[in-house]
Amino acid sequence: MLWHRGSPKPLKPGHETPQPKKSGRAKGKARKAAKSHANAITKNSTPTKPPTYVIAIRDFVPLAESIINYKAPRVRVPSTFSTALTRAISARRAHHSILGEKNGAKQDGHTHFISVLERVQNILQPLFSDQNQDTLANKFDNLDVEEPSEESAPAPDTTFPETSESDADASYEAEKVQDLDEMYSAFCLIIQDYHDFRVAIQETWMGYRQGVFDLVSASIMTNTALEFARRLEKDAAPLFDKFGGSAMVMEVVFEAQCKGMGEDKYFRERPDDDLNFRVWEAATQIYFPTYMFLQGFVLMVSNHNMPIIKPGYYGIYDPSSDRTKKTSREKFKEDKIILSEQFTEFALLCICAPDLLAADEFILSCKEAFKTHTVTLFLSFATQVYLDIHHTLRADVRRGLSDLMATAEMIDESIKENLQYHKSLRIMGWPRSNDAVLEKIQQYIDLWVNRDPVGEARRRLKQPPKEHHMMLSSHPLLCGLITYSLKAPFQELSLAFTDAWGSILYTYHLYHAVRQENLLRNKWLDMDVIMGIQEKVFVGDQPKTPEDYLKQFALSMGWSAAAFAKDRRQGALPVSSRGPKYLKELAPVAQMFKSRFSEGSQQTDWTTADIEQIISKSN
C-alpha cells in the first residue's frame, strides 16, 4: 500500500517476534522428525495478529512529504481527511478561549503540535479533493490506492523497507497525545458537535410542530443523533478518565470559564440563586445547568429510595409564556420546574416499570445513572435535548401522546376485526398459532398505551397520584419510538398475513382486468395506493388482453414463464423456482431500526458509514 511504502523507517510495531537463526539442513530421520514437529506446531498454533504500527508525531511531516512526492499514481487525499485536519487545528486553537491562560511549557507543547498539523495541511494542500466532486456515494472511493509498479520511480530521499506478509495486513494509527491540552481539545470538539446536534434536533421538532415531519420521523432522527452523541463521549472516555471523568472535566472547564470572565462560580446575586447567572450563557454552552440538576437528583435515587417532589414546589410551568423574553434566571427556573416534575417519573420508569424495547437514549442513560450514581457529559446533553423539545413544542408537547394513542387504537382495532373475520377461516399458509404474534402486539398496546406502567408503579409505592400517562405526555420522543415499535412489526405481520391469503395481490389482478375492459365506473383508491407503491407487480408490461390477464395471474401464482412457451410439450405446468409473488415490505430506511426498537437489540454505536448507508437507501 502507498501509505505504508512511503512511510519513514522509524515506524515500529507494538511488538516484534524474534526470528530463529538459520541452521544447516537436517538429514534422514532428523529431517523427518523436524518436519513432523513443524506440522504439529502449525496445527496447534493460532494465527498471529497482524502488527499495529504507531505513527509518531515527529513522523507526520516526513510522511506527508512522502505522499506529496509520490507520482505513480498521484494520490488524491479525500475531502474527509481535509475536513478532519482543518477541524482538529481550529479546535486546538480555539480551546484556550475556554480554559484561559496556561503555563508556558504546556502552551509551547500545544503550539508545537498545532504547527505540525498545519505543516501537514500545507504540504498536502495540492492533493486535497475538490469538495464539490465528493458525494456521499463515492467519498471513500479514493481510499483504494493501486499498488505502484516496480518500474515506478520511488519518492525522493525515501527508503522503502521490505514488506513482509504480516505487514501487508498491518494497521496504522497515529500517536495519541493524552495530556491536558488534548483532553480539552477533545472536550471542545464534542461540545461543538453537540451544539450542531441540538440545532438539527430543534429544527426537526419545529418541523413536527408545523406538520412537516411526523412523530416517528422526528423521534428516530433525534434518537439517532443522541446515539451519535453518546458514541462521541464513549470514544473520548479513556482520555477523560485520566482526568477524573467527563463530570470532572465539566467542573474544571466551568471554573476556567468563570475565571476567564472575571467571575466567581460561587457568587450568587440573590440568596436563593442556584447559579451565578452572570455566566449563564457560558454555562449553558457546556450543559452545566442540567449537570447541576442531575447531580442533585441522581444521587438520591436507588431501588430503596424514590424522591418525591411536590408539584408546584418550584413554581408552575406556563407553556403559553414566551421563553425568548425570559431572563436567564427565569429560564433556569422554568427548566427546573419541568425537570423536577418529570424526573421522578423517569426514575419510576427505569427502576420499577417493565423493560421497554423502544427506550430512547435519554431514558437508557438515566437508567445507567440511577445505577451508578454518576452523571456524564452525555446525560447532561441528553437532558438538555429533552428540555429543548419542550422549548420548541411548548403546549404542543402533549401531541406526541395523542399521536401514539391514535396509532395504537388503529392497529388494535385492525387486529381485532381481522381476527374476528377469520375466526372460522383457515389456510395452510397461516395456521392458528400465527395469531399469537398479532395478539402479542395487542398485549404491548395494552401495557404501554391503555395502561400506565409508571402510574401503576407510583401506586404500588403509595406515592401521591398524578394524571394518567404523566411521563409519556411530557416525552414525545419516547412516544414516537413506541409508535414505531408498533407500526414496524404490524406492517411486517400484515404483509405476511395478506401474502399467505393472497387476498390483495390476486384481487388486484381481477381489479386490473375489469378496469382494463371498462367494466368499472369508479376507482378503488385504496387498492391503487397499495399497488402503486409496489415495484414490478407485473412481469413486463401491463396486460391488456384477456390472454395476458390470465398469463400474468398464473405467473403471480407461481407458475413458470416456460408454461406459456409456444413449443411447450403437454404435461403438468412447470412451477417457478422463485415461487408465488408477494407484496414487498417497503421503507428500507425504517427497516434498519426495527431490531433496535421492536426486537430488543442492543444500542447502536453509529458510524459515518452507517449514516451513509441510511442516506443511500433513502435515495
Image: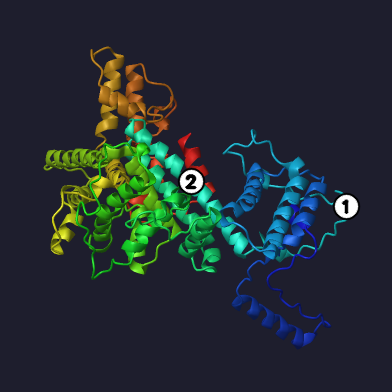
Point 81% across, 80% down: residue: 22
Measured in 3D between alpha carbons, the distance from the residue under mark 1 to the one under mark 2, in whole angstroms, is: 45 Å
Question: In the picture provided, is 215 more to the left or to the right than 227?
Answer: left
Residue 584 at x, y percent in the picture? 36, 37
Q: Within 10 Å of the Cα at label 1, are there few (<14), some (14-19), or many (20+) other Cα atoms?
A: few
Q: Residues within 10 Å of mark 2 (few under 14, many from 20)?
A: some
Which residue shows up at 79% across the image and 47% down it? 68
Q: Earlier in the sequence, mark 1 or mark 2?
A: 1
Q: Which residue is mark 2?
A: 195
> Compared with residue 557, is residue 452 higher up or lower down, i.e. above or below?
below
Residue 91 located left or right of residue 35: left
- Residue 172 or residue 333, whichever sits in front: 333
Q: Residue at x 48, y 46 (%)?
A: 195
Amino acid carrying mark 1 in the image: Pro
Residue 43 appears at what percent x and percent y? 61, 76
Picture coordinates of residue 545, whole percent (x, y): 35, 16
Residue 272 seen anywhere in this rendered image of the structure? yes
Which mark is drawn over residue 156?
A: 1
| Residue 136 vertical placement versus 278 (above, below) | above
Q: Nearer the viewer, residue 559 or 541?
A: 541
Q: Where residue 108 appears, x then y in whole percent?
A: 71, 60
Q: Which mark is in front, 1 or 2?
A: 2
Q: Quadrant of residue 535?
A: top left
- The vertical placement of 301 against 89, above or below, is below
Secondary structure of residue under mark 2:
helix
